[in-house]
């Protein structure tokens, strides 16, 4: 890492230790683990914001290169913004912020404040890109507009989710209602978009609404391809020599339940005892970046297996957001 950045991290670590212990100076032994944690957080944050930035550019291209010049709409908060833009002629960038703001406020309770902050940044950047960046209009063919406009918009949404944020707030509403009502996220999103497309058919035309459905399907499939779902459940198996430290982080800091199973490694020879514990935890796709960051702080060489969980019952994962 750059020496200048490393020096800044060391200074931050020293200040934290001095403020916490009220001592005049911090020892290298005290500083090292904090600096390591700060480095991991910084590297992960940079990667995630790169995903968000690329997602904003892709979504902006889908909107201004395909949908907006041809008066097309999409589903979700973006679709509502496009519909209002056609009716009121207000700038789309302003509408994107206004429409998404209530959903982002909801995200502070449904998911966490860090996720909400990143989403605000992503949506604001998208509004700026849509307002100021002049993308070329690619085509006037309605079928190509619906398919490729939906593709680039879905790509942007998917990359933003990979970066730990959203640029379309209806996903947050769907997550919230699915937890409250016990129905799937997909069903909630479908209901929301049926309402949007119905208004589109009434205000614009039935043909426009039909193309909007095609745009939505292209975007939805692209999002699935990029992130495998909005809040898909992931079963994570963690094998590490620092299993107890990881367990404490999962249960105390992240407030997630986990299962500990005794195991014996098969890589050593027969005369060597190689006992260790295996940790199993279920989280959502949106919470995965946070989990990876915390594990890397403790053990960058931890062996991690991730599997898609189609459904689950019981427990607290559907009731409690990640801290």
Image (cartoon, rainbow, N blue to C red):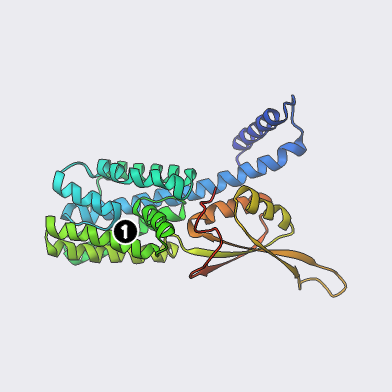
- Pinpoint residue 190: horizontal percent, then vertical percent: 30, 64
Quarter the N terminus occupies: top right
Residue 99 seen in this snapshot? yes
Q: Quadrant of residue 3?
A: top right
- Residue reaching furthest to the right: 271
- Residue under the image location 21 percent in, 62 percent down: 212
- Residue reaching furthest to the top: 24
Within-10-Å neighbours for mark 1: few <14, some 14–19, many 20+: many
* Residue at image mark 1: 152
Count up the numbered dots.
Answer: 1
Closer to the camera in the image, 102 or 93:
102
Closer to the camera in the image, 61 or 125:
125
- Residue under the image location 61 percent in, 43 percent down: 39
Q: Quadrant of residue 157?
A: bottom left
- Pinpoint residue 226: horizontal percent, then vertical percent: 42, 63
Residue 131 seen in this snapshot? no
Q: Is residue 248 left or right of residue 57?
A: right
Q: Is residue 216 left or right of residue 32?
A: left
**SS category of the residue bearing label 1:** helix
Q: Quadrant of residue 11?
A: top right
- Pinpoint residue 262: horizontal percent, then vertical percent: 74, 67
- Residue under the image location 44 percent in, 65 percent down: 228
Asked if 141 appears above or below 319 in the picture, the reply is below
Asked if 93 appears above or below 239 in the picture, the reply is above
């Amino acid at each position: 890492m750059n020496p200048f950045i490393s020096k800044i991290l060391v200074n931050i670590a020293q200040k934290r230790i001095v403020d916490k212990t009220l001592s005049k100076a911090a020892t290298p032994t005290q500083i090292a683990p904090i600096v390591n944690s700060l480095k991991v957080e910084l590297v992960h944050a940079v990667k995630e914001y790169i995903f968000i930035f690329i997602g904003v550019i892709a979504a902006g291209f889908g909107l201004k290169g395909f949908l907006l010049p041809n008066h097309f709409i999409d589903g979700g908060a973006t679709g509502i913004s496009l519909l209002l833009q056609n009716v009121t002629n207000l700038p789309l960038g302003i509408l994107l912020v206004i429409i998404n703001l209530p959903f982002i406020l909801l995200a502070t309770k449904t998911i966490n404040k860090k996720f909400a902050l990143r989403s605000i940044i992503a949506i604001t950047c998208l509004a700026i890109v849509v307002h100021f960046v002049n993308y070329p209009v690619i085509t006037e063919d309605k079928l190509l507009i619906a398919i490729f406009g939906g593709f680039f918009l879905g790509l942007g949404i998917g990359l933003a989710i990979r970066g730990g944020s959203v640029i379309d707030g209806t996903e947050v509403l769907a997550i919230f209602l699915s937890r409250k009502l016990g129905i799937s996220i997909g069903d909630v999103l479908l209901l929301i978009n049926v309402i949007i497309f119905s208004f589109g058919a009434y205000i614009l035309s039935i043909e426009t609404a039909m193309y909007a459905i095609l745009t939505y399907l292209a975007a939805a499939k692209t999002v699935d391809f990029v992130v495998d779902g909005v809040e898909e459940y992931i079963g994570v198996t963690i094998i590490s020599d620092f299993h107890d430290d990881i367990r404490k982080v999962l249960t105390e800091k992240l407030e997630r339940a986990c299962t500990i199973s005794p195991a014996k490694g098969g890589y050593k020879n027969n005369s060597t005892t190689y006992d260790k514990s295996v940790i199993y935890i279920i989280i959502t796709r949106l919470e995965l970046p946070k989990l990876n960051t915390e594990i890397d702080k403790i053990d960058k060489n931890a062996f991690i297996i991730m599997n898609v969980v189609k459904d689950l019952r019981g427990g607290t994962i559907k009731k409690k957001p990640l801290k």
